[in-house]
Amino acid sequence: MKRNLLFFLLISGLSFSQQKNVKINNLPPASENHYFPLISYSGKPLLENKINTFLQVSELEYVPNSGGNPFKRASTATNSYSNYVDYYSWEKMESPDHILSITMEGEASGAYPEIFFIAKNFDLRTGNYINVQDLFRPEAAKTIEGLIRKEIKKQITDFIGVLKAEKNPSDEVLAQIGLYEGCFTEYGLDDIEYYFAKDKLKFIAPRCSNHATRALDELDHPVVEFSYKVLEKYWSSYAKDLVSGSEKVDKTSFRNKLYKGKIDGKYPITVLIKRLYDEKGGEASFNASYWYDKNKRLLEWNGKMKGNHMSITESEYYSEEARQWMVTGLIEAEMKGNTITGTWQDYKTKKYLNLELEEL
């Protein structure tokens, strides 16, 4: 018994120090429109770099240490979605020992301004982004989606009941009832933000309102939460180890992973796999950003995966004039374990070069 207690205290101390060694500051140059998290992970430079690279490439479309202002594309709407993006605040959430959960709020302005809330979660054992799909057994994912939808619908239905109970409802109340009765709630796990709290997982659904009806939306973002104890029967083995504080790390999806490697054996590149779309007909699609380590200029990959085989189209930028992505390369590759190998073909010259990548 004494031996077990000492072991528990040792593991707890190691886990606590892991959280204690993670610090967050503002990415410079911070301003009232750009408060963005910059992670410092004492004694873990590789993991620190992985987390910062993911955040800056995925959110700011900026490769760390590539010079200039990291907020340039966000603040000038020269990003891929042509919106001006401001980041007003971030917060480090109180989460289990092996997990870094950060929430951010801001505003994206295209034709209209839209307030947004996003959450990013990282495995402090590996520096990898935590995919919500990896947390649940494949057969349990649909059950979790159903539980989330049920709770969202209940919150909305309960609020509609309160509104309808009002005597002589005003035009504003009638408009609110219409807003909530028409609210879309059929969200999948890919469509909902989530973060780890101390003893529960919280899901934050999109609002029922758009920019024009925002003032009517008292519910704002519906929040659905489940205790880890309730989720135990749905967890994957990866999630069980992650939440319990175990050092064991099971294999997870390649989505949101960083890869390093070379083209032609001499041109170092880094790849960030981004969204992986649901498989249909045995084939899944995905997109990624990559850059040559020397010039750090972002290029885009749009790919298909069937089994372990990938077919990828590489594009440099989207041409508004031509209304299409300007293709620069074609890739055929195979995934085996933590590696991706294949050929990269120059779109103009048709010349083939070898491609080798390994998961960071």
Image (tube, rainbow, N blue to C red):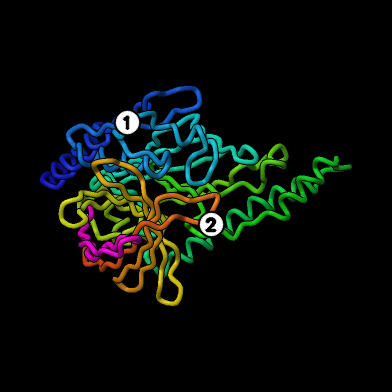
Residue 342: x percent and y percent? 23, 66
Residue found at x 32% / y 68%: 310
Residue 175: x percent and y percent? 79, 45
Residue 288: x percent and y percent? 37, 54
Residue found at x 29% / y 48%: 128
Magenta stretch mostly in which secondary structure?
strand
Q: Which of the numbered marks, if any, corresponds to residue 67?
A: 1
Q: Name the N-terminal-most of marks 2 and 1.
A: 1
Label 2's element? helix
For label 2, the residue is: 148
Q: Residue furthest left?
A: 3
**Kind of residue indicated by mark 2:** Ile
Name the one closer to the observer, 288 or 245.
288
- Side (left or right) of 172 relative to 7: right
Residue found at x 60% / y 39%: 114
From which residue to which does the magenta span run? 340-360
